[in-house]
């Protein structure tokens, strides 16, 4: 049977999932200190409600959302606040963090559980807002905003992204195997909020065991359709996923809601279940620690605010051949210059890669081969956009839709001249977005 996929572009990088796909999720012990970032989403940082000396419990609200595109932040442990400090984020910039010293005894301060079947859509949305849930697919957009579309946007489809097309990462795969019931429960809660009777789960066909278990757990009601998709990167991108599952194309500059759809990640659905059924706010990150540079690869549940170095230490440390630490996957992740960087709600992986796993090719002049153009799933011109960014010609880059780029990295992966295309495009995209904000 021919598998569904998006049309045009895409690449097939080595998967390397065999390093961790067989390892069940396990909880990491609480570290000696946590630095919980106030900036946890694609929006404004939260406003702190605690100060030095404040006593908190696991789940206590420590910072409130500051505006519509912002999320609440809760304490991942019971302990004492030792101050508000500054620490590097995953992208290298400095951010405000709440420093917490854990105590020996751990007490919960969760939200009251809600019965999903008897709750209204408004009550469920409010719970998701209170819990501070963000999208787990990469952008970390506030979930309550995404499931509250404007009245003029008629939503008829919910699509769950279970592709996990990034190499190395297996945290979504393990959620599908280890927390199948909770995942399905979260999907049905999202369906109730959106007023839908059916939804789809798109999953790449390199995960047959997860496909089988999802189908068994979903049952025969017919409200959940499990759709195997061709294994191809970036199958998990929202626009690619909607093309593959629903055969709908999202126009440039538009969002999935403009074609009647909402896309959520598997991790987001599990977080929704936890917040509604258990009253647990978003205080943990489910992530994969992998790469041939780490001594003990693992799939972990980690308290938000845990330093990367503490996660690496729990995984046995690094080999002497380790050359680079990434937060996220190898295609869209960010190289780290500090191991003090704290884990956030949307952290999907920590990779420790060796020299053999990294392309060390020397950059040369563009060969004008067009491979980056053929690989781009959004039909952009990566080499042109990167060159304009490099030259500081941001107005021209904006006219060529640089802000449409989702920074998936397929162009850089395909480039035989080893030009860091996606990195230049990312810088140009940030400059164009700043220009647009200044105009507004």
Image (tube, helix red, strand yellow):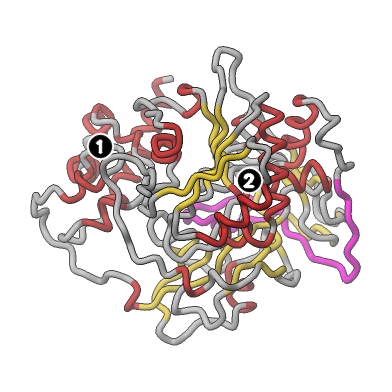
Task: Tell me the quarter of the picture where residue 43 sits.
Answer: top right
Total labels drawn: 2
Residue density around tag 1, few if under 14, some if 14–19, many if 20 or more, within 10 Å: some
> Is 387 on the left or on the right of 367, as rendered?
right
Residue 6's tag is none
- Which residue is denoted by mark 2 in the rendering? 268
The mark that comes first in sequence, 2 or 1, is 2
- Which residue is denoted by mark 1 in the rendering? 379
Task: Tell me the quarter of the picture where residue 241 sits.
Answer: top left
Residue under the point 27% across and 69% down: 359
Residue under the point 11% across and 53% down: 366
Residue 237 position in % (x across, y down): 43, 43
Residue 95 on the magenta segment: yes
Segment colored magenta: 84-110
Vertical placement of residue 419 versus 146, above or below: below
Residue under the point 41% across and 36% down: 239
* Mark 2–mark 1 distance (CA, rounded to whole Å): 29 Å
Residue 230 can be seen in this image: yes
Residue under the point 63% across and 37% down: 222
């Amino acid at each position: 049977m021919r598998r569904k996929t998006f049309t045009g572009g895409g690449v097939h990088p080595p998967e390397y999932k065999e390093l961790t796909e067989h390892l069940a999720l396990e909880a990491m012990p609480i570290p000696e200190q946590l630095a919980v970032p106030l900036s946890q989403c694609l929006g404004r940082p939260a406003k702190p409600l605690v100060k030095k000396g404040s006593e908190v419990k696991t789940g206590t609200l420590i910072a409130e959302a500051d505006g519509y595109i912002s999320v609440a932040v809760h304490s991942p442990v019971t302990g004492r606040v030792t101050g508000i400090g500054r620490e590097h984020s995953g992208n290298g910039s400095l951010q405000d963090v709440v420093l917490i010293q854990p105590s020996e005894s751990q007490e919960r301060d969760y939200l009251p559980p809600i019965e999903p079947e008897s709750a209204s859509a408004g009550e469920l949305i409010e719970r998701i807002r209170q819990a501070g849930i963000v999208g787990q697919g990469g952008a970390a957009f506030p979930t309550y905003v995404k499931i509250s579309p404007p009245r003029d946007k008629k939503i008829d489809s919910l699509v769950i992204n279970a592709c996990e097309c990034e190499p190395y990462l297996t945290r979504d795969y393990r959620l599908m195997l280890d927390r199948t019931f909770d995942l399905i429960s979260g999907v049905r809660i999202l369906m109730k909020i959106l007023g839908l009777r059916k939804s789809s789960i798109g999953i790449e066909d390199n995960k047959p065991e997860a496909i089988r278990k999802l189908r068994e757990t979903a049952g025969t009601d017919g409200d959940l359709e499990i759709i195997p998709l061709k294994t191809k990167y970036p199958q998990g991108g929202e626009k690619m996923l909607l093309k593959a599952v629903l055969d709908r194309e999202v126009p440039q500059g538009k969002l999935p809601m403009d074609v009647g759809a909402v896309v959520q990640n598997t991790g987001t659905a599990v977080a929704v279940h936890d917040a509604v059924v258990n009253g647990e706010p978003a205080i943990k990150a489910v992530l994969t620690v992998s790469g041939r540079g780490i001594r003990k690869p693992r799939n972990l549940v980690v308290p938000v605010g845990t330093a990367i170095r503490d996660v690496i230490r729990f995984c046995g440390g690094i080999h002497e051949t380790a050359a680079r630490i990434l937060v996220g996957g190898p295609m869209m992740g960010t190289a780290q210059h500090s191991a003090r960087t704290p884990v956030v709600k949307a952290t999907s992986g920590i990779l420790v890669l060796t020299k053999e796993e990294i392309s060390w090719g020397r950059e040369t002049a563009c060969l004008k081969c067009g491979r980056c153009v053929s690989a781009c799933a959004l039909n952009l011109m990566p080499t042109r956009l990167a060159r304009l960014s490099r030259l500081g010609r941001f107005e021209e880059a904006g006219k060529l839709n640089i802000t449409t780029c989702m920074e998936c990295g397929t162009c850089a992966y395909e480039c035989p001249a080893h030009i860091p295309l996606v990195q230049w495009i990312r810088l140009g995209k940030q400059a164009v977005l700043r220009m647009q904000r200044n105009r507004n």
